[in-house]
Image (cartoon, grey):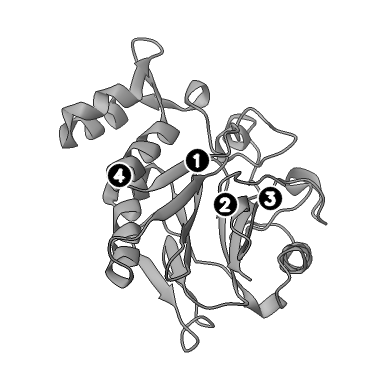
Amino acid sequence: MFYSKRLKKFKELKHCFFSRKGGFSKGIYRGLNCGRGSKDKKKNITKNLKFIAKKMLVEDKNLILMHQTHSNKVKEIKKNNFQNKIKSDAIITEMRGYALGVVTADCVPILIYEKKKKIIGCIHAGWRGAFSGIIKNTILKIRKKSPKNKIYASIGPCIGKKNYEVDLKFFKNFIKKSKKYKKYFSKKNEKKKLFNLRRFIADQLFKLNVITDHVNYDTFKEKNYFFSFRRSTILKQKDYGRCISTIRLI
């Protein structure tokens, strides 16, 4: 379990970037796999999510997860809509007694807090979501509810630059949108670049005047602590687990 030093200072908050340690899953999912979209046994995922709910001190049904699709959609969770299947890549709420969760396996989990109106949120930010505006959309949705107030964010464990290898087509797609994006890439060889996803996301938050800190671990490298889509692909495994990051108002 990993924590943001900044978010931990707020006594009205409870949060955690969970590792894969512990849990009930076996085999390639060994540990605390919280990915409902994985091919792990449903009973194991259910047990793992019950464990998370217990750690977050909420009822099982009050641990709210998204159906994540690498989109730029943000949903606000209210009492009349949270039980439905939430198709989005970011959720925010003002409700107490509910934990918001995001699952990742190389993508970036971001936990958010706006102190004055007590708004919490979490974002699933892969390159697609970040590229298409998930971070900006989330912050603007919070600002619409609470203009000019400070927003805090913690960027959790994700794939590190040294292990995020991309092809030239990927690189050119970014540069097409803005030549300034060149700074997020370094050369690996004639056909491959290395992409700094963490910095790409951190800079977006900085431009939006969000006060940010990092829980800086490389999910690809730290195989004992994190699941990794890319590592599983390289190892030719049939599937992969997902870690969960959560936040709630006490």
Q: Label 1 belongs to which residue? A: 213
How many discs mark residues in the rendered view?
Answer: 4
Dot 3 or dot 4: first in sequence order is 3
Distance in Å between CA atoms under marks 3 and 4: 25 Å
Dot 4 or dot 1: first in sequence order is 4
Kind of element beneath mark 1? strand
Whether residue 106 is situated above or below residue 246 in the rendered picture: above
For badge 1, the amino acid type reads Asp
Distance in Å between CA atoms under marks 4 and 1: 21 Å
Dot 4 or dot 2: first in sequence order is 2
Q: Are marks 4 and 2 in contact (CB under 8 Å)?
A: no
Q: Label 3 belongs to which residue? A: 18
Is disc 4 surrounded by few (<14), some (14 to 19) or many (20+) residues within 10 Å? some
Distance in Å between CA atoms under marks 2 and 3: 15 Å
Q: Report the mark closest to the observer, 2 or 3.
A: 2
Dot 1 or dot 2: first in sequence order is 2
Q: Label 2 belongs to which residue? A: 7
